[in-house]
Image (tube, rainbow, N blue to C red):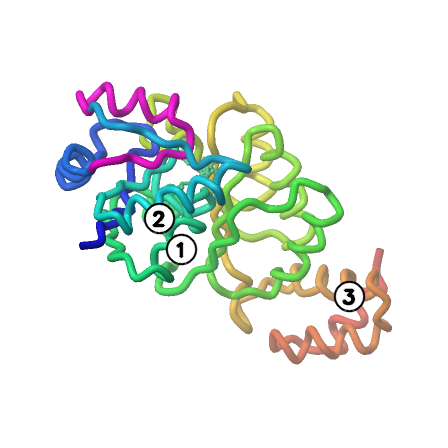
Amino acid sequence: MKGTLYIVSTPIGNLEDITLRALRILKEVDLIAAEDTRHSLKLLTHFNIRKPLVSYWGEKEKVKAEETLQRLKDGQSVALISDAGTPGISDPGTVLIGKAIEGGIRVVPVPGPSAVITALSLSGFPTEEFTFCGFLPAKETQRRKLLERISLEQRTLVFYEAPHRILETVADMAEIMGERAVVVIRELTKLHEEVFRGTVSVVLDSLEHSTIAGEYVVILEGRPEKGALHFDDALKEVRELMRKGLGRKEAAKKIGEEYGFSKKELYDRSLEG
Ligand code: SAM
């Protein structure tokens, strides 16, 4: 009989967040496939779990996935874990999961923490619908292009970000997405958990005066609904469209219709300063 692949979520900081089921599965399986075995050993040692470990990180992922698939086909059970949170969510793991599905292996999720959901729950923003964007591109031009592409999105937007890029990213958001509400959360569930709330420029200023370290999630309010946009922001959008090459008249008409403001008022005010 074929084995089972368990996708096991592990804590994103606080070790008490591991579930009872995750602990039981990790103790029962024949093999644990980990992103980085050295990293996971700390977690497993903490919970007194001693199991054969295989790493599926980086270039090894495809080869290791094949080997692990064979073990699953031979009837072994395998727990897939990543360094933190839910495997496959901005983390490796999808290669093995895909192969297991193709190979007719039973795949069972063992849910638990994930930074995207944890941060969203704390944001206070609408969560009926949201867009998870993962990590933005590291290169400035690509990052800005992507932000421009999603700047019309009305759903709440969630991003993962590294500490060395957090200031640039929030600065780009201020410039490209306009003055919206944002929540930046650092070190969720850890000792130095910190939440920055406000408009993008206010949060940017707070971040600039804070210790930049650890892991960050950025949650940005979606583009305000028709009519909910402040006139000055609509004016900024007119200027932004003009910067991109649209004529003043067309830009004022487009934004006026979109947000329910007078196109004449937008046109006239866009001539000022
Ligand atoms: N698989 C993980 C999950 O389910 O959340 C995400 C892994 S991804 C490689 C790592 C990124 O997730 C970090 O750079 C950060 O943006 C976010 N993250 C993970 N743990 C976090 C935490 N404790 N606090 C804030 N952000 C966190």
Q: Which quarter shows the N terminus?
A: bottom left
Of callouts 1 and 3, the N-terminal one: 1
Percent x, y of residue 217: 47, 40
The residue that mark 1 highlights is 99
Q: Are circles 3 and 2 on residues that touch, CB within 8 Å?
A: no
Residue 101 quadrant: bottom left
Q: Amino acid at mark 2?
A: Leu
* Residue at left offset 71%, top offset 42%: 139
Q: Residue at x 83, y 60 (%)?
A: 243
Q: Earlier in the sequence, mark 1 or mark 2?
A: 2
Residue 138 position in % (x across, y down)? 66, 40
Quarter where residue 255 is shown:
bottom right
Q: Mark 2 near ligand 1 (CB under 8 Å)? A: no
Q: At x 31% / y 20%, what residue is drawn?
A: 42
Quadrant assignment for the C terminus? bottom right
Q: What distance separates the C-alpha of mark 1 from that of mark 2?
A: 7 Å
Crowd band around label 3 with a 10 angstrom C-alpha radius: few (<14), some (14–19), many (20+): some
Label 1 sits on a secondary structure element that is: helix
Magenta span includes 12: no
Q: Is residue 184 visible?
A: no
CB of mark 1 within 8 Å of CB of mark 2? yes
- For the residue marked with disc 3, what is the amino acid? Leu
Range of the magenta residues?
30-49
